[in-house]
Structure formats: structure tokens, C-alpha cells
Amino acid sequence: MHIVVTIKPVIDPNTPSVLLKIGKDGVTLELPAGMSQIMNGYDANAVEAALALKDKHGGTVTVLSVGDETSKNCLRRAIGMGADRGVHIAGPTGLACDSSLIAKLLGAAVGKLGFVDLVLCGRQASDTDAAQVPFLLAGELGLPVISPVKNIQGVDDDSAVVDRIGEGCTQRLQVKLPALLGISNEINKPRPAPLKGVMLAKKAEIPTWTHSDLGIEAPQPAMTLRRLYIEPPVETRAELIAAESARAAGRALADRLRQEGKI
Amino acid sequence: MPKILVIGAISEGNLTGTSLEAVTATLELAEAMGAEVFGGLIGDECARAAARFAAAGLSEVFVADHARHAPYVAEFHVAAAQAIVRRCQPDVILAPSTSETSEWMPILSGRLDAAMASACTRVGFEGDHLLATRPVCGGAVQGEYVLKGGLRIVTLAPAAYEAATLSEPCPISLVELPDVQARVTVVEQLNDQVGSGPPLRTARTVVSGGLGIGNRENWSLIEDAAAALGAAVGATRAVVELGWVPHAQQVGFSGQKISPELYLAVGISGAVHHMAGLAGAKTIVAINKDPEASIFRTAHFGVVGDAKEVVPAFIARVKELRAQQA
Ligand SMILES: Cc1cc2nc3c(=O)[nH]c(=O)nc-3n(C[C@H](O)[C@H](O)[C@H](O)COP(=O)(O)OP(=O)(O)OC[C@H]3O[C@@H](n4cnc5c(N)ncnc54)[C@H](O)[C@@H]3O)c2cc1C
């Protein structure tokens, strides 16, 4: 089984809001001092899902990342976890990058890899939160797509059964392979890279493919980012209900909310 | 004259409130663009929803009614939307952002080579292009995107616009649907709604718990408080990941975005991703043992204390007050 996983480097989503600063160009976020971009969390779940399938069924896992040099660090982390090889695709990253452009580059790269059984993408990147690349990439490749997937129930030679997060429900779906799945965080906990993996990943050769290597024209964005802005938080300063004990405070809270007509 | 198509959403046979919010966005945009406004609906036996949609101030509503639309499968919805687009020939498509449109809309945008902006809070028209504002980075930052010519698609976050008011109905036309083979089939569909309370999305009161609840056994604190208040149960992503409650109960950027009158956050730190689901909440009450927890900066009322002591006393007093009232 050949599984391809796509990975985006993103600003750490747990960066405290007070450290978030918009760059002079107005369309990028400045990385706080001492911080570097990390693998998008949902993509780490996708890598783990691919490795779990490889553990069970055998096969190879290829990881792809469009971006600048930081992409290579993310690919190394995936290789450290157990992916077999990584390919870096030169292209834009960050908030200004466009889903359809990324999907075209990834589509051409998957095409160049040859036969694929399963493509796994994180359900969305935690910076743009656009959640479009999985669907557009599936379109480029002519594959059926399901997202967000919170469980892979089983995979056999020509189909997979997965659980999709639906509108207030869980949909158990069967899909013909090859297929593309958008992976959500509920599915697993990504494994840490073992020391041996880290050493291997350090030495791994990671080729860079440009659009001309992929035999396509430089794709154009469908949408452009004009500006980013941060809205000042609405500070309410909570009215704190104090009392001689926690129990008394609980009772006082109920009284206060009744007084306000809230309960 | 340019055309805007607004595609409504149906839940349990009824047109959703978010569909009427999308109509408001559409009518505002139509005014700016000088456009004519059409509706589209995709569902199974959707006559009731269509009748309501037709009264929302549109010129005509195109309906793709077919048994294969329920339970929902993306490929059938995409085929239906393509049929509606062929009839309507729109320049812009708007729709509420739901877990279904989050899947089939980007597939459609790929097929039609249309630029798409998802889960937007604002959509405007300037010069010759659309401007769409959407939260990025889990809601910590806002981005303003430009969508140039050709067909453009925008989905709207819930509660970004007021719901449109209903008036005289417009004509409803059924569209013919092509035969399609879906490569995805539904094996089964399980309802994730827990408890007997109101649905989370539309509840007036919501009691949510976070990691501060401590363990699965203590989760009954949250359920008991919700039952005493007739409220829905919510949770943080951290709690959902531990499997204490299903994903359908998750409040936040990657969960439900809700607008209750009263939101009780118990043992919740107040991370940006969580608060992004609460933009529409009127009154937020926090119970947290850490006086420095960031939730106290956006809450209206707070108790600093251990949830295991505060909440049972709170529930007991709520019950007393309710009994006095009865
Ligand atoms: C891409 C992405 C998307 C995300 N989407 C969401 C989302 O949609 N919704 C969401 O909720 N999160 C989301 N998160 C996670 C979010 O960033 C936070 O990690 C999460 O909300 C924290 O959950 P918590 O408040 O339960 O836990 P914690 O942050 O650990 O907070 C626990 C709180 O409980 C308090 N506490 C501890 N013991 C007690 C006690 N005995 N009594 C009272 N209080 C106590 C502590 O003081 C603390 O404030 C997302 C994260 C990422 C990266």
C-alpha cells in the first residue's frame, strides 16, 4: 500500500495572542523571537494515521510539503516518526497562500510519484483554517474525498470504511480506493519520533521539486489576501462572586443570576 | 444584470436559521452589485423548507429534491448544485457554512474552477471584486481576502448576519438531476446528540465543562447542572479528545459556534479556540479555581473556586429557586 500524506508548516496555534504581530507587509504574521514554524497539528494526525495503516498492512508512506525551507523540518519530523521518504515542493506558505494553487502543485507532485492507494491530508491548516486543499487536491487527482474523518475503521484492497464527523451525527462511510481522506484530531495521538528515527531523519535526502520539475506552469492564486488585522479583545472584567466558602459562592452565583433574570 | 445564488441548508426537514442569515448577506451584496437574487435548495422532500425559503425576498427558488440527498453524501449534493448552477448561471454563490457545505462546496468550487472563501463573517463588493473577511488562526486574527472575476463562492459563519424577514413568496422550480454514481456510500449514521436537553446549537442556556472537571466520573456535575437549568451540554476540545463526550458537543472554532443567552464555563481556561465559538453568547459565567485564568477576562460573572464544591451547591440553589417559583 502506498500512502501519501501532505504537510503544511504553520505558526504554533498555541502561540499566546499577545505575541501575535502582523508583519509590515500586512499579510504575514511575524514569528515571535525564538519560535519556528511547526507541523500543522491535523497533518501530524494524518501522518500518524498513515503510519498506523503501514504498521498493520505494510507498504510505504511518502510525505509532501509545499513551502520554503521550513517545510523540510516538518518532513524530517514525519520521517523521524516513520515515514519512508519526503519531498519538498517549492511554493508559498503562511496565510497569504491560496488553496487552489497549493492543490495544483500537490496534484502534480502526487502524479509524479506514480500509483497511490490513499492520500491523507489534515482536515485544514490551523493558520488559514480554509479547509479546501483536501477537496481541491482530490479534484485534481480525480479521487473521491471524505472529510473530516475521526476514525479509520478498516482498509482492504479496494475500499476503506471511515467515520466522518457529520452535522450532529457520525457517518460511517465506505469509499472506493484510491481515495483522499481529510483527517481530524479525534482520530489519534501522533507518536513521538524515537531517537533512531530522529537520527535517520537528519540524514534523509529530501529533494526539492519546482513547478517546472513537475512539468506545469506556475499556478496562479484564485484568491488573494489583502490584509490581516487583530481585533482588540473585548474585556469584560468579570464580576467575581466572593463568599466565605466555595459552596456559599456556588449558592450566591445562583442568586445573582436569578437577580439578573438569567435563570 | 449579475446574479447571486444563495443555497439554503435543511435540518430535519426545516430550513435552518443560518439559511435566512445567508439571505441577508445576499440581499446586502445584491444591493452593492446591482444583482438579482436566486435561491437553491438540495434535500429529500424539501417542499416545506422550499416554501419558507421562497418567502425570503428572492426572485426564484431552484429545488433539487431527491431521496438520494438524505442521508447526506457529498457527491450527490455536488451533482445537484451543478444542476442548479446550470439553470441559474450565477456570478456569486453564497451559503451558510455547515459541516456539509464545508465538504461539498469546495468540491464544487474545484469542479467549476471558482474561487472560494469559507466561513466568512463579512462579504462585500468593491470595484469589480468581492471582499470576504474571515477568521484565521483559530479566530485570533482576521483576514480580508479579495476574490476577482469569474464564478465566486462564499460560505458564511453562523450568526454573522441577522436572519432575513419573510414576505411574499416567489416561484419555486424543480431542477432535473443527472444520474451519478457516488463512490462513497453510507454504511450507517449514528446520532451524536447526548442527553435529553435542548440541541446545543440553538439552546438558550449552555453548561460547558473543560479539563478542570478532572475526570470522566465528575462529568455528571456538568450534566446535572445542565439538567437543573434545562440547558444543553457543551465541552472543550480537550474534553472531547479524552472521549468524555462526542465531538457534537464541542464548542469552539473547530466545534459548534453558538449564541446562547447564558453560557456557564466550568473548569475551562478560555483559550482563543474555545472562545471563538462564543462570539454570540450574551452572558458568560466562569467557574475556575485559577483567578488568573483568561476566561475571567471575557466572562461577565465568575466564581474562583473548585468546581467540585461550587457546582453542587450552585445546582442545589438553582433547584430551590425553581421550586420556589413553581
Ligand atoms: C487547531 C486547533 C483547534 C482547536 N479548536 C478548539 C475548539 O473548537 N474548542 C475548544 O474548546 N478548544 C479547541 N482547541 C484547543 C484549545 O486551544 C485549548 O487547548 C482547549 O480549549 C483547552 O481546554 P480546557 O479549557 O478544557 O483545558 P485547559 O486549558 O487545560 O484548562 C483547564 C482549566 O480548568 C481549571 N481547573 C482545573 N481544576 C479545576 C477545578 N477543580 N475546579 C475549577 N477549575 C479547575 C484550570 O485552572 C484551567 O483554567 C483547538 C486547538 C487547536 C490547535
Image (cartoon, rainbow, N blue to C red):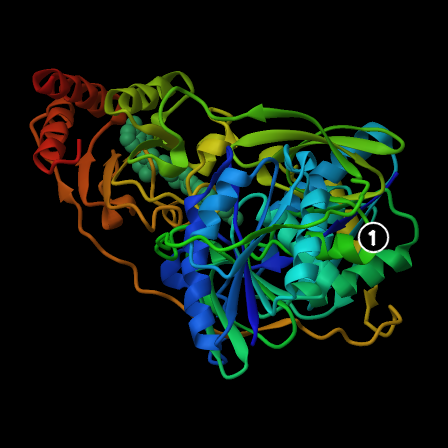
Left or right of B177? Residue B159 is left
Left or right of A200? Residue B51 is left
Decide: few, some or many residues near mark 1? Use Cα within 10 Å; few <14, some 14-19, many ≥20.
few
Quick check: B149 above or below B118? below
Residue A141, given in percent of the width and then of the height, sits at 82, 54
Q: Is residue A27 visible?
A: yes
Instruction: Tell me the amino acid under the disc marked 1.
Output: Gly
Of residues A47 and A164, the one drawn nearer to the viewer in this rendering:
A164
Residue at x 67%, y 60% (from the top left corner): B87
Name the image quarter holding residue A260. top left
Quadrant hosting ligand 1: top left
Quick check: A164 above or below B54? above
Q: Which residue is mark 1?
A: A142
Name the image quarter holding residue B274. top left
Residue at x 40%, y 16% (from the top left corner): B217
Left or right of B169? Residue B288 is left
Residue A216, given in percent of the width and then of the height, sits at 85, 72
Q: Is residue B141 visible?
A: no
Of residues A171 and A90, the one drawn nearer to the viewer in this rendering:
A171
Quick check: A116 above or below B72? below
Left or right of A154? Residue B28 is left
Chain letter for mark 1: A
Of residues B238 and B91, the one drawn nearer to the viewer in this rendering:
B91
Q: Is mark 1 within 8 Å of ligand 1?
A: no
| Mark 1 residue element | loop
Residue B86, given in percent of the width and then of the height, sits at 70, 61
